[in-house]
Image: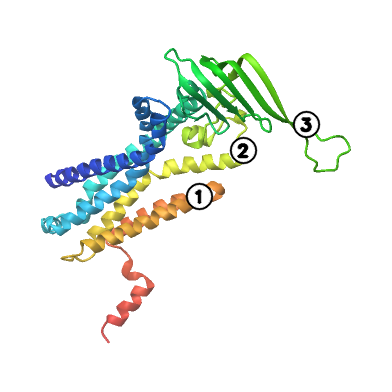
């Protein structure tokens, strides 16, 4: 039966969780999106494209921070209730530990379901869209990336410079340095050129220019081992030449997808035709385990906060101590979870450690909230009882 106090506590917890989660996600989004500002300031992409590109990162942020914000909100709200003596009044009214914890556990359950929806569906879809769009910008939108008076890098091995651009889109004073062919870099200078889009990617048609390429001939026969070949500069003048600006040779649909872009079924049962390496297969299984475990941490961290705040003796100024203990426990759990996940990615036989770092704290917190049954029968407690008993 839902009581008025349940609604009161749930309303405070849910409002705080919504505000803290959105605020923290916005802060993380702001710090992460700074690396894409260059696309707007120097590469000429519209601000709307920037917002859509970085907005695809938000589901991943929410999935990561939701367990943490649930813990923070539960801990701080219940500490505040204790400092304001509201918990004392509720206990005096006959509410048990479980009745006090019920609103927080209900909110944590909803947060866990939301986290599962993010991890299983929204995050892989948004990551796939983000990586595909990023790949397209780097490989297919070179016409946008080339700005007048700027050395524009299309990947790490192709640089394009244009002195200025005519109103009709014609580039003047063009320099292209192409190092995609290893050991034979090409430098092309032309008076004018125009970039056109083709099914295989953008191409630039150059007019009245010169093409320079350094080639290394093989060493003469009979030369001692280690003898380097002779480098020769080939110079070619042309009236018209066409150059492919696509950085990658394969189309977008052939792009290798990382573990973050794949669904659970693809992670656990990848397509054999992809010829995925064993190292990546181990990472896939670790990623699948992490997606299944991370939402359960919402319940675990919430229970840790409740066990920290609702148990122990009442202290008039004890809120700070509860905050310190709860934060220290969760930081330790996060560190252990990170270590277990890294070990599991290297050796899949250690993946059960990821589940242990999540389920053991839940069991311990439930035991503490239940009043630590059996505590007095532990061996070291038996000794203390005997020492304090009658002579």
Task: From the top left corner, tell me how far across and down residue 235 is, in percent.
Answer: 69, 23
Q: Secondary structure at mark 2?
A: loop
Who's the residue at 22% across and 42% down the image?
A: 14
Task: From the top left corner, tell me how far across and down residue 75 is, in percent.
Answer: 25, 53
Looking at this view, is 221 or 369 the one in front?
221
- In the visual, does 231 lie left or right of 322? right
Who's the residue at 26% across and 84% down the image?
A: 390
Q: Quadrant of residue 169?
A: top left
The C terminus lies in which quarter of the figure? bottom left
- The answer to whether the residues at label 1 and label 3 have Cβ atoms under 8 Å apart is no
The N terminus lies in which quarter of the figure? top left
Q: Is residue 382 above or below residue 286?
A: below
Task: Please rate how many residues cluster around mark 3, counting C-alpha atoms within 10 Å: few if below 14, some from 14 to 19, many from 20.
Answer: few
Distance of label 3 from label 2 (alpha carbons): 36 Å
Indicate which disc residue 217 carries: 3
Q: Quadrant of residue 295?
A: top left
Name the residue beneath numbered marker 2: 277
Name the residue beneath numbered marker 1: 342
Q: Secondary structure at mark 3?
A: loop
């Amino acid at each position: 039966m839902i009581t008025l106090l349940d609604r009161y506590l749930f309303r405070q917890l849910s409002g705080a969780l919504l505000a803290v989660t959105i605020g923290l996600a916005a802060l993380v989004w702001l710090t992460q999106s700074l690396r894409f500002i260059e696309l707007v300031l120097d590469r000429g992409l519209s601000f709307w494209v920037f917002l859509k590109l970085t907005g695809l990162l938000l589901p991943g942020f929410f999935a990561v921070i939701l367990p943490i914000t649930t813990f923070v909100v539960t801990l701080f709200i219940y500490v505040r209730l204790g400092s304001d003596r509201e918990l004392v009044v509720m206990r005096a009214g006959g509410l048990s530990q479980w009745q006090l914890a019920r609103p927080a556990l209900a909110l944590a359950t909803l947060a866990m379901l939301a986290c599962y929806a993010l991890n299983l569906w929204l995050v892989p879809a948004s990551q796939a869209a983000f990586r595909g769009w990023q790949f397209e910008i780097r490989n297919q939108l070179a016409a946008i990336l080339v700005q007048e008076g700027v050395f524009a890098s299309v990947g790490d091995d192709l640089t394009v410079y244009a002195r200025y651009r005519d109103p009709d889109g014609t580039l003047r004073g063009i320099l292209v340095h192409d190092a995609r062919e290893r050991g034979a870099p090409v430098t092309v200078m032309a008076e004018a050129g125009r970039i056109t889009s083709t099914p295989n990617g953008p191409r630039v048609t150059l007019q009245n220019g010169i093409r320079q390429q350094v080639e290394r001939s093989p060493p003469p026969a009979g030369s001692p081992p280690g003898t380097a070949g002779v480098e020769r500069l080939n110079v070619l003048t042309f009236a018209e030449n066409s150059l492919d600006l696509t950085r990658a040779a394969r189309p977008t649909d052939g792009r290798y997808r990382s573990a973050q872009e794949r669904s659970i079924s693809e992670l656990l049962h990848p397509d054999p035709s992809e010829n995925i390496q064993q190292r990546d297969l181990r990472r896939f299984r670790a990623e699948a385990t992490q997606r299944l475990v991370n939402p359960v941490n919402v319940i675990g961290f919430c229970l840790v906060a409740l066990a920290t705040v609702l148990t122990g003796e009442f202290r008039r100024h004890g809120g700070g101590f509860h905050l310190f203990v709860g934060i220290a426990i969760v930081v330790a759990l996060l560190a252990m979870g990170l270590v277990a996940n890294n070990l599991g990615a290297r050796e899949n036989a250690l993946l059960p450690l990821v589940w242990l770092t999540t389920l053991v704290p839940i069991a311990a917190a439930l035991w503490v909230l239940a009043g630590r049954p059996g505590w007095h029968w532990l061996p070291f407690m038996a000794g203390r009882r005997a020492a304090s008993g009658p002579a």
